[in-house]
Amino acid sequence: MRRVIAIAIAGLGLAGCSSFSLDSFKSAPPLVPVALESVPPGADATTSLGPACKTPCSVQVPAPDAGFSVTFAMPKFEPVTVPVQVIRNPGDIASPATTIIEPSPVFAELRPAAPPAKARKPMRPKKKPKAAEAPAPAAPH
């Protein structure tokens, strides 16, 4: 009788695992190196996937299913955003799967920002000169 109860309890325990998924066995997407360069060097390069660094540099990003972007920013320069394509080659029996990042390296040329416009003082309306008072009409004689 104890065996029947132990088997029944074990069966109930397994029934509670109905939310078990094979997704937990999938490996994380492979990391792909992305080289980042800018002119002038020293720009903050931030990927839309999260990783960032100061150029010239390289970051590791999880290979996305679609493209992503890299934004380059530096004080006194206009920011530049560069789209990046991810090209996947599934491979076959003779060759392994590959992931290619295009362009490689990801490059941006930053342009100096326009100087801020000078603050102009508001113009005061000009005072109109008072019209010369006309002489009073002469009294009739």
Image (tube, rainbow, N blue to C red):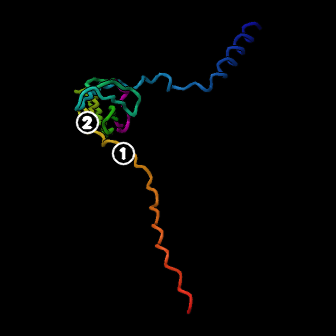
CB atoms of marks 1 and 2 within 8 Å: no
State the extent of the magenta-drawn residues as a range: 60-69
Q: Residue furthest top?
A: 2
Residue at 50% across / 23% down in the picture? 24
Image coordinates of residue 78 in percent, x first then y, are 32, 39
Residue placed most toward the observer, 136 or 130: 136
Give the image quarter of residue 92: top left
Could you tell me how many numbered marks the image carries?
2
Kindly identify which numbered label has been placed on residue 68: none
Q: Quadrant of the C terminus?
A: bottom right
Residue bearing mark 1: 118
Residue at 33% across / 28% down in the picture? 44
Image coordinates of residue 58 in percent, x first then y, are 28, 23
Q: Secondary structure at mark 1?
A: loop
User: What amino acid is found at the position of numbered circle 1 in the picture?
Assistant: Lys
Residue placed most toward the observer, 2 or 88: 88
Residue at 36% across / 30% down in the picture? 46
Residue bearing mark 2: 108
Magenta span includes 138: no
Look at the picture and state if 55 lies above or below 103: above
Q: Secondary structure at mark 2?
A: strand
Q: Residue furthest right?
A: 1
User: What amino acid is found at the position of numbered circle 2 in the picture?
Assistant: Ala
Image coordinates of residue 128 in percent, x first then y, are 46, 66
Tell me how far mark 1 sits from mark 2, CA to CA: 29 Å
